[in-house]
C-alpha cells in the first residue's frame, strides 16, 4: 500500500503509522489524517485531551469530569449543594408539609404513630434503648428500624423489634393489620 501524508507533520509515512478508521462504502480502508506519533504528542484522543469546564471555564484533566458532562465534578457538586440548601430544600419542605397535612386528615392513628416513633427516637438518644448495628433477623449490617409489633398504644411505645428496612417491609407486608409499621 502506498504511503500517506500526515496532516500535522506533513511527512509521508506508511499505512502502519496511522490508526485504521474503518472502511469506505467502496471497501477501501480509511485511516486517521494524523500519524500515531502526532496524535500521541498532542493527546488528541478524547479520553486523554484536557477539557474546558462550562461553569468555571478552566481547562482540567478528563478524570475531573463525570462522563460526558460539560462541567467538572467540583462545579457540579457545588451547584447540587447550593440547590439542596436553597430552592431544593424549600421545595422538599413544601412537599413534606403537604404530605403531613394529608396524613393527619386521612389517618386517625397518624399522630399516635408519630408519638410512638418519637419516643423510640428519644429512648435511643438518652440510652434507654440500644439500636444494634446488625439486623437481628438477617444479620445484615444496615441501619435498623424500630418495628412496633405490639401497636402504638402508650404502654407499647418502647416495645420494638429492631429490623433492617428489607425485613421491616417484609414484616409489615405479612402482618394482617395494615395500620402497624
Image: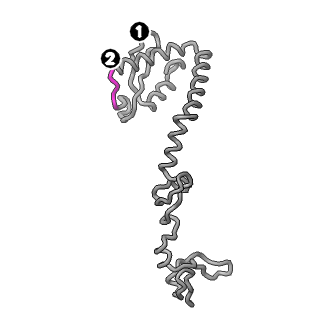
Does the magenta-highlighted stretch encompass residue 159?
no
Which residue is at 51% across, 69% downward? 45
| C-alpha span from label 2 to label 1 | 15 Å
Is 8 positioned to the left or the right of 167 in the image? right
Question: Where is residue 123, by image quadrant?
Answer: top left
Task: Name the element at disc 1.
Answer: helix
What range of the chain is rendered magenta?
128-133
In which quadrant is the N terminus drawn?
A: bottom right
- Depth check: 84 or 177 in front? 84
Residue 59: % across, % down: 50, 60
Does the magenta-highlighted stretch encompass residue 130?
yes
Residue 168: % across, % down: 45, 27
| Residue farthest toward the right in the current orientation of the protein | 26
Q: Tell me if I can see residue 157 in this picture.
A: yes
Nearer the viewer's eye, disc 2 or disc 1? 2
Q: Are marks 2 and 1 in contact (CB under 8 Å)?
A: no
Residue at image mark 1: 155
Question: Where is residue 32, by image quadrant?
Answer: bottom right
Q: Tell me if I can see residue 69 in this picture.
A: no
Is 127 positioned to the left or the right of 19 in the image? left
Residue 127: % across, % down: 31, 19
Mark 1 Cα shell of 10 Å, populated few (<14), some (14-19), many (≥20) = few
User: Which numbered dot is residue 143?
Assistant: none
Instruction: Give the mark, 2 or 1, whose residue is nearer the N terminus.
Output: 2
Which residue is at 52% across, 87% downward? 13
Q: Is residue 31 above or below residue 103?
A: below
| Residue farthest toward the bottom in the current orientation of the protein | 2
| Secondary structure that dominates the magenta span | loop
How was this image coloured?
one colour
Which residue is at 43% across, 22% downward? 147
Task: Name the element at disc 2.
Answer: loop
Residue at image mark 2: 128
Amino acid at each position: 500500500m502506498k504511503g500517506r501524508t500526515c496532516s500535522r507533520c506533513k511527512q509521508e509515512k506508511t499505512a502502519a503509522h496511522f490508526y485504521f478508521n474503518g472502511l469506505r462504502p467502496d471497501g477501501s480502508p480509511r485511516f486517521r489524517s494524523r500519524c500515531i506519533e502526532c496524535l500521541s504528542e498532542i493527546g488528541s484522543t478524547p479520553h486523554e485531551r484536557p477539557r474546558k469546564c462550562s461553569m468555571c471555564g478552566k481547562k482540567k484533566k478528563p478524570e475531573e469530569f463525570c462522563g460526558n458532562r460539560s462541567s467538572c465534578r467540583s462545579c457540579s457538586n457545588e451547584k447540587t449543594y447550593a440547590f439542596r440548601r436553597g430552592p431544593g430544600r424549600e421545595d422538599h419542605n413544601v412537599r413534606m408539609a403537604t404530605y403531613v397535612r394529608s396524613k393527619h386528615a386521612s389517618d386517625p392513628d397518624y399522630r399516635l404513630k408519630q408519638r410512638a416513633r418519637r419516643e423510640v427516637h428519644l429512648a435511643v438518644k438518652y440510652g434507654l434503648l440500644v439500636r444494634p448495628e446488625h439486623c437481628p433477623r438477617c444479620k445484615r449490617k444496615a441501619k435498623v428500624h424500630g418495628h412496633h409489633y405490639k401497636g402504638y398504644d402508650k404502654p407499647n411505645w418502647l416495645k420494638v423489634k429492631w429490623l433492617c428496612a428489607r425485613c421491616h417491609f417484609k414484616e409489615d407486608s405479612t402482618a394482617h393489620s395494615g395500620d402497624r409499621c
